[in-house]
Every structure is written in structure tokens, then in C-alpha cells.
Image (cartoon, rainbow, N blue to C red):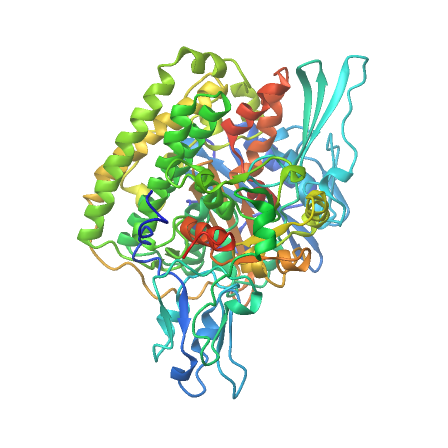
């Protein structure tokens, strides 16, 4: 794969990519999108602008289908990983799209050098985010050419990549794994579950994402995110993309 | 099923009024169910449906040779009832689950312990069976594993290299799926169904959509039934191919491992070409499918399919032709047909023990009523057999898709879904890539779910992995585990 030196592979046409919300186009009093969203990613309190949280979104596009005014649209863009949780919330003027992740600071990048070793923890993940993280290691994507590798022990890792909403039974194991990673360390939350609880948001059996248990440095939206979206986030973090 | 049964009969993907399901007292219900199992019925589900007066036990039986399902129930029970497991071990996990979920004690259950330990303790916090002896040692693995996979805990009792006993403690992935379905469906329900087991989104989504249609007394348009069958085989191809690569990796046969990792993605991309999502999310909905496959798209999918099938056949050829691979797989992790039948194994792991069990053939619903796939069976019950059945199914799923894509029925993809009927029981079985996905719903007086039961094939087959490890070297656990490749979250729900 020539990416990232050449153009990125094209997403499937029906994938739709990141969503865009131009709340100025919303019809007065309309909340059709709010009613169809499975994960409560869209809110529109009375008299206020609509807000769409890409971190909660499972990209089913039900909102795009029902929107009468074209306020919510698909961009076809695979890039949507963000450093701050609030950067995934769309709707305010000038915030129609996700604010893409900036690189780690120079000191952290220097510490990491040319290698990033991650330990993966699935904490209530359904297996899809895990599978599309795993696929980055296959010959097509060849993640190791970027010096990024998944390791078996947290002691050998620079950080964690977490999937799942963090089930109650996994909370302790996740904390212990995090503590076992030598500092300084980074945490990457992959998928709607790990960012905000996904389809399980509000269940008493789960947390509302990894951020409730450990500090998160990178959020990668999707259900699951396309491998390209995950790779984009990782490279962005390491300042390997222009 | 030559003799008549006192249970109510129904076909897969249909419903019957809840009050037409025959009921027995607890003792009589266990005896009636045992009598059906003794004359060849298979237990698909045994679960509790709570009511004011107590918990009713519900049994879903399958008469595979007759393409018929049967259902029965007990009166509302409290306290205890005589365990079905005492005579029929295939009920062992079901009865532990009933006890854990509803507090109904199956008297005489040989080993009553939690299924998922949802009381706040970590699943590995309980007692484990221990083997004593100077040569015996214990190996504990998990919940966090070395690879990029889901969490679970394995406790091995070993005498030297040999595993005497493996106990599997799951529940780390419990997300409260069934709990949230009571009173549903809700807005999040469809997404939850698509993530019950993330690699089986099409199977579980199809089972759920079928339940909703059966409860409403409708069917999805034929074209949508066709597309669901196509997507189900693409899901099977992707997962089987990935598993063959993983098996190759675990015996250090790297060419097949590397190739299959890539080809798996090629199959996922075909699903994405149809619906946008590599795991098929957003495709299946009650009432039909959300996307159509126009001729140009079908052509593109067929071209991609032909290439991926050619590639996987070549990659598997390297593997089967290597004596070193065959030697590592043969006579390792064997489950005998009698054991598999006794514990109620399903799907490819059961077929690899010589059991002819395949919902697509035994209980055809949807498009499988019109177009079927020969059942792939291998008798030896070992890692080799589970690999062999996968390879056969890759071939047959490929052939099926080549035939079916060109004979697609015309028509609509989706109807407006009708409201579910009140006080009905519906059952839907779907042969996911691991095996039988069973969904059963009971509605209340408002047409909402009074109880929605989900049984992922992993629930039936984890015990098979534990049996496969008996007498096997602990160092062979990775290939045995990969040869089953069961879902943790599908079990934990």
C-alpha cells in the first residue's frame, strides 16, 4: 500500500465517512434526527442548536436519511480521530466537522523515538474494533513499517489501545494493565463503545467508555472505525502525516 | 418424530400465541422435555421467563430430521425444580443460567456455579476445580490475553505437559444485552443486536429481524431474504478465512497465515461494498434490508469474490500440502461425536465431530427455503477436522454465492415493518459462521418484549473446547482455541 506517501485508499461508497453537521440549516423545531439515533449521539434542547457527537455515533446514517434540510451530510472522509473529546462534537458555528488530532508534543515524540509499542485491552468490545485493529498488522497495511507494534505485555508497551465500553468485570483488569505500563504512557480509545459506551450507553453493566477509567489521548470514532481511520489517528498522533 | 409430541410445533422463523404453548408443572415439564430429548430432539434453548407469580421455564426443542421446532413451558415456579441436566447434560449451562438469572434452583445439577458471575465479583474470583498431586500444577491465563482479542479466564490443571482439566471462567464482557431488551425494542436495540458478537453481525441481525417479522406475522420481501443469505455467506467466508490464517500462524506456517489475513479483509470489503460497513452493520433491518445491490454493484462484488476465492484456494493449498501442518493438526484436541451430542455442540465444531447439524439445511428459513448448501461434515473431531470443515465451507459458500448472485429475485428490498403481535412467542434460528444463533422472544399485552432470549453458538461450544483440552498438551491450547475461535461477548451478552 503506497499510503501515506500517495493517496489513501478510497472508502467504500456507502461507508459515508465522517458526518458533517451544519446546524444553521436545521428546520425550526425539527428533531427528527434525535429520534432515530440509536446511541443518543444527537441532541437538540429546545431553542438551541443541534449537536452531533461523533464519539457516540455508530455511523448508521439514519439521521442523514431523515434530515429534511440536508443539515447532516456524509463527507466520505476517513479522517476523524481527535485528541480531545469535545473536538468530536459538531454543531456550533465553525465546528461543522471534527477537529482532527494534533501530534503528541515534541518531548513525548522524542521519548518514543521511531517506535510505538501498544498493548491492546478489550473491555466489553464485540470483536469488530479488535478485528479491524488487528488487520493493520496484515501484509496489506503492514503497520510495522511505521514502527508501530502490538506487544503481549504492558511492561513492554508505551501505551494502551482500548476497545469496548469497559464492562464492570473488566474495570479492575483495565486499571491494572494501565498501571503496569511504564510512564509516560498514552491511551487510545477505538470505537464508539470505548469513546462513549456506544450502543450500551447507560447500561448499569458498563462504564461510558475508557475515559471514565483512564485518561485518553486519542479518540478514534466508528463502529468499528475503518482500518484507515485507525491508521490515520495513529500516524497523526506520531506526526507522520502532513 | 414419528410419534406425536405434547409440545407445540412451529417452524423456524414463525410465531405462535403464548397461551397456546402447552404448560406443565415444574416436575412434569422436566420429564416431558427429557422424554423428547430421549427420542431424538435437540435442546435449542432452556430459559426463564419471569412473571409476577414466579419464573416460567421455557424449552425450545429441535427435531432436526423433521425440519420442525417445538416449544413448551412450565407454570410459574419459585424455589427449585428437578434438574434436567441430571439426565441430559446438554442442559447444564442453561440451568446454571436460569439459576443465576432468576434464582430457580435446579435440584440435582451436578455442578451448579455462576455462568457469568454478574454479582460484582470478577469471573475468576470464584472457586476452581483443583487436581491434587505432586506432579500437578495449575496454569492461569487471562482475562487480558497476549493478542488483540477479547478477555476471558482459563484455569488449567496440568500433570506435566498434559492438561487434566480446563475450567473456563467468562463474564468479563457482560454488557447487559438481555436485561436491556426487557420492555423493548428500543432505539439502540438494532445496534446491540449487530454487536452481540461483532464478527457475527449479519447472523444476529438476521435473527432479530426475523423475530420482529414473525411477531408481526409478516415476511421480508424475497429480495431482502436473498440479500441476507448472501451477506451471511460473506460473513462466513471472511471469518473462516481469518481462522485458517490464525491456525496457520499458530503452527508457524507463515505463507498461509499472511495471505489469509489479507484475503479475510478482501471478503470484509465485499460486505462493505454492499452496505458500507465491513461487518455488515446497517444492512439488515426488520422488514428487509436497507441497501439494494444494483447490477453494476453486483458485478463488482462478483469480480471481487472470484478473485478472493481463487486466492484463498491457493493459500489453503500450500497449507494442506504441507505434511508438517497436517501432522500438527491430526489427533490434537479431539472431541468425540458422542461427547459433542451429549453437551449439545452446534455449528462447525459439531460438524467436525461428524454431527450433521446445520440450520440452513435442517430448519431452512428465508432464502434457504429455496436455495441450499450441502452440509460439510468431517468425522475426526480434532483440530484437523475443524480446519477441514472450514475449508469445505469456504468452497461451498463460494459456490453458493456464485450461483445465487446471478439468480437474485426481483422486487423491493424493504417493507414498512408491522407492529409486533401481542402475547406471542417467536423463534428464529440462523446458522452463523460458528453455528446456531437462536433468538426467542415473548411479547406482552402491548407487543413489547416480555422476555428476549439470545443464544450465541459460543454458549453451546465453550464446553467443547474444555473437553478438547483433556489429555492434550497445554502447549497445544492455542491451536485448539483457534480451531474453535469462540466469541466471549456472544457468551457473556
- Percent position (x, y) of residue B467? 61, 23
Q: Residue at x 50, y 48 (%)?
A: A129
Return the residue nearer the eye: A204 or B228.
A204
- Percent position (x, y) of residue A20? 40, 71
Q: Is residue A103 above or below residue B160?
A: below
> Is B108 left or right of B337, judged from the image as shown?
right
Q: Quadrant of residue B170?
A: top right
Return the residue nearer the eye: A227 or A206.
A227
Q: Is residue B100 above or below residue B157?
A: below
Return the residue nearer the eye: B258 or B289.
B258
> Is B88 left or right of B226, judged from the image as shown?
right
Q: Is residue B177 visible?
A: no
Q: Residue at x 52, y 57 (%)?
A: A103
Callout count:
0
Quarter of the image with the N terminus of chain B is: top left
- Percent position (x, y) of residue A117? 57, 41
Q: Is residue B256 above or below residue B189?
A: above
- Percent position (x, y) of residue B89? 63, 29
> Is B469 left or right of B99, judged from the image as shown?
left
Q: Is residue A71 visible?
A: yes
Q: Is residue A81 above or below residue B483?
A: below
Amino acid at each position: 500500500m503506497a499510503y501515506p506517501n500517495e493517496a489513501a485508499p478510497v472508502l467504500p461508497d456507502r461507508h459515508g465517512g465522517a458526518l458533517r453537521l451544519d446546524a444553521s440549516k436545521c428546520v425550526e423545531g425539527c428533531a427528527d434526527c434525535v429520534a432515530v439515533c440509536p446511541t443518543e449521539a444527537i441532541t437538540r434542547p429546545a431553542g438551541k442548536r443541534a449537536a452531533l457527537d461523533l464519539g457516540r455515533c455508530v455511523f448508521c446514517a439514519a439521521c442523514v436519511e431523515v434530515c429534511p434540510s440536508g443539515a447532516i451530510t456524509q463527507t466520505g472522509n476517513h479522517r476523524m480521530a481527535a485528541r480531545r473529546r469535545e473536538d468530536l462534537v459538531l454543531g456550533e458555528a465553525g465546528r461543522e466537522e471534527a477537529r482532527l488530532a494534533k501530534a503528541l508534543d515534541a518531548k513525548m515524540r522524542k521519548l518514543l523515538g521511531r517506535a510505538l509499542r501498544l498493548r491492546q485491552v478489550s473491555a466489553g468490545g464485540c470483536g469488530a474494533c479488535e478485528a479491524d485493529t488487528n488487520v493493520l498488522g496484515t501484509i496489506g497495511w503492514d503497520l510495522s513499517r511505521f514502527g508501530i507494534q502490538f506487544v503481549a505485555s504492558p511492561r513492554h508497551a508505551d501505551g494502551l489501545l482500548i476497545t469496548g465500553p469497559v464492562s464492570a468485570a473488566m474495570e479492575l483488569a483495565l486499571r491494572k494493565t494501565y498501571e503496569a505500563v511504564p510512564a509516560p504512557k498514552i491511551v487510545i480509545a477505538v470505537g464508539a463503545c470505548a469513546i462513549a459506551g456506544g450502543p450500551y450507553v447507560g447500561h448499569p453493566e458498563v462504564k461510558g467508555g475508557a475515559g471514565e477509567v483512564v485518561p485518553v489521548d486519542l479518540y478514534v470514532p466508528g463502529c468499528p472505525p475503518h482500518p484507515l481511520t485507525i491508521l490515520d489517528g495513529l500516524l497523526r498522533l506520531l506526526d507522520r502525516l502532513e | 418424530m414419528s410419534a406425536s409430541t405434547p409440545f407445540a410445533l412451529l417452524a423456524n422463523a414463525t410465531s405462535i400465541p403464548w397461551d397456546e404453548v402447552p404448560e406443565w408443572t415444574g416436575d412434569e415439564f422436566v420429564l416431558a422435555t427429557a422424554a423428547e430429548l430421549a427420542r431424538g430432539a435437540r435442546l435449542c434453548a432452556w430459559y426463564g421467563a419471569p412473571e409476577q407469580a414466579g419464573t416460567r421455564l421455557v424449552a425450545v426443542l429441535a427435531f432436526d430430521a423433521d425440519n420442525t421446532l417445538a416449544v413448551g413451558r412450565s407454570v410459574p415456579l419459585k424455589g427449585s425444580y428437578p434438574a434436567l441436566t441430571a439426565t441430559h447434560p446438554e442442559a447444564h449451562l442453561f440451568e446454571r443460567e436460569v439459576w443465576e438469572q432468576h434464582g430457580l434452583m435446579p435440584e440435582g445439577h451436578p455442578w451448579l456455579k455462576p455462568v457469568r458471575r454478574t454479582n460484582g465479583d470478577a469471573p475468576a474470583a470464584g472457586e476452581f476445580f483443583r487436581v491434587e498431586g505432586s506432579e500437578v500444577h495449575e496454569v492461569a491465563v487471562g482475562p487480558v490475553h497476549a493478542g488483540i482479542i477479547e478477555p476471558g479466564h482459563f484455569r488449567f490443571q496440568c500433570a506435566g505437559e498434559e492438561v487434566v482439566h480446563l475450567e473456563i471462567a467468562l463474564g468479563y464482557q457482560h454488557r447487559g444485552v438481555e436485561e436491556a431488551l426487557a420492555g423493548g425494542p428500543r432505539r439502540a436495540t438494532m445496534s446491540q443486536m449487530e454487536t452481540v458478537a461483532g464478527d457475527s453481525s449479519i447472523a444476529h441481525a438476521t435473527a432479530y429481524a426475523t423475530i420482529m417479522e414473525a411477531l408481526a406475522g409478516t415476511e421480508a420481501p424475497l429480495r431482502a431474504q436473498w440479500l441476507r443469505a448472501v451477506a451471511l455467506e460473506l460473513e462466513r467466508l471472511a471469518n473462516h478465512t481469518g481462522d485458517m490464517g490464525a491456525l496457520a500462524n499458530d503452527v508457524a506456517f507463515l505463507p498461509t497465515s499472511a495471505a489469509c489475513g489479507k484475503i479475510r479483509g478482501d471478503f470484509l470489503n465485499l460486505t462493505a461494498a454492499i452496505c458500507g460497513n465491513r461487518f455488515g452493520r446497517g444492512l439488515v433491518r426488520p422488514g428487509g434490508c436497507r441497501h439494494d445491490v444494483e447490477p453494476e454493484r453486483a458485478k463488482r462484488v462478483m469480480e471481487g469474490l472470484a478473485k478472493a476465492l481463487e486466492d484463498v484456494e491457493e493459500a489453503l493449498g500450500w497449507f494442506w500440502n504441507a505434511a508438517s501442518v497436517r501432522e500438527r493438526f491430526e489427533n490434537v484436541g479431539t472431541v468425540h461425536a458422542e461427547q459433542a451430542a451429549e453437551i449439545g455442540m452446534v455449528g462447525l465444531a459439531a460438524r467436525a465431530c461428524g454431527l450433521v447439524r446445520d440450520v440452513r439445511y435442517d430448519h431452512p428459513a428465508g432464502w434457504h427455503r429455496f436455495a441450499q448448501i450441502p452440509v460439510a461434515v468431517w468425522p475426526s473431531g480434532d483440530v484437523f477436522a475443524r480446519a477441514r470443515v472450514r475449508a469445505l465451507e469456504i468452497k461451498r459458500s463460494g459456490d453458493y454465492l456464485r450461483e445465487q448472485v446471478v439468480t437474485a429475485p426481483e422486487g423491493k428490498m424493504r417493507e414498512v415493518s408491522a407492529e409486533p403481535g401481542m402475547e406471542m412467542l417467536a423463534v428464529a434460528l440462523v446458522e452463523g459462521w460458528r453455528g446456531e444463533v437462536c433468538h426467542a422472544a415473548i411479547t406482552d399485552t402491548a407487543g413489547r418484549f416480555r422476555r428476549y432470549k439470545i443464544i450465541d453458538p459460543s454458549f453451546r461450544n465453550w464446553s467443547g473446547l474444555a473437553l478438547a483440552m483433556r489429555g492434550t498438551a497445554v502447549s497445544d491450547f492455542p491451536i485448539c482455541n483457534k480451531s474453535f475461535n469462540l466469541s466471549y461477548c456472544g457468551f457473556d451478552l
